[in-house]
Image (cartoon, grey):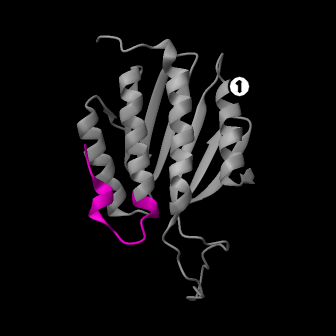
Amino acid sequence: MVLLESEQFLTELTRLFQKCRTSGSVFITLKKYDGRTKPVPRKGHAESFEPADNKCLLRATDGKKKISTVAYSNLLRANMDGLKKKDKKSKNKKSKATQ
Amino acid sequence: MPHYQAWEEFTRAAEKLYLADPMKVRVVLKYRHCDGNLCIKVTDDVACLLYRTDQAQDVKKIEKFHSQLMRLMVAKESRSAAMETD
């Protein structure tokens, strides 16, 4: 699992989308992240740890290659813009079809 | 694993699930260009909500909702402003 900076993540994500155009899926996972780097202790409240509240984890994979990044509130806009452009481009095959 | 047909229902259930326990819930997007479909899943490893589409008009909705959830996750205080449903 490659941990990247936001910008790099977006670049790699674009590449993933392009690679999977002819076959395969792109999975994007989003999860709230409180910044912990150590596993939760089993016994005893050794929780000497301040949960941060303004981050989330973004992961992407095509089944083989995995990339991830930590997104902060201030970087969110950049991430969302990147995704939006790609989705629109990729979806040009399906026009607004009537049901 | 309920597959939702109505977008409204899905977003309501998904937000509810997230607000119940923000740390447990994850959102998964699966996009297949070759088949031309997009699927969004919201789960807390107990309940799982799915919405699938092959319509370009839904992509925007899904993307908006995805951003909404992202905003909820990074909001410092639980602001109801971030929860603007459309």
Drawn side of residue A36 relative to residue B76, left or right: right
Q: Is residue B30 magenta?
A: no
Picture layout, residue B51 above or below residue A58: above
Residue B6, x across and y down, in percent? 25, 31
Residue denoted by label 1: A19
Number of numbered callouts drawn: 1
In the rendered image, residue B24, in percent from the top left (x then y), is placed at 45, 60
Q: Nearer the viewer, residue B58 or B32?
A: B58
The answer to whether residue B81 of the structure is visible from this angle is yes
Q: Which chain carries label 1?
A: A
Quadrant of residue B11 within the rendered picture: top left
Of residues B8 and A47, the one drawn nearer to the viewer in this rendering: B8
Q: Nearer the viewer, residue A92 or B24?
A: A92
Indicate whether residue B76 is drawn in magenta. Answer: yes
Mark 1 is surrounded, within 10 Å at the Cα level, by few (under 14), some (14 to 19) or many (20 or more) other residues, namely: some
Residue A13 to residue A2: above or below: above
Q: Is residue A28 left or right of residue B46?
A: right
Residue drawn at x 42%, y 56% as measured from the top left: B71
Q: Estimate the x, y position of residue B72 in percent, counting from the top left.
A: 39, 59
Q: Residue at x 38, y 50 (%)?
A: B68
Residue at image location 43% in from the left, 47% down from the top: B67
- The N terminus of chain B - image quarter: top left
Picture residue at 70% right of the left edge, 40% below the top? A11
Magenta range: B72-86
Rendering coords of residue A67 (x, y %): 70, 46
Residue B45 in view of the camera: no
Depicted B16 relative to depicted B30: above or below: below
Local SS, label 1:
helix
The quadrant of the rendering that contains the C terminus of chain B is top left
- The amino acid type, in three-letter code, at marker 1 is Lys
Residue B3's place in the image compared with A56, above or below, is above
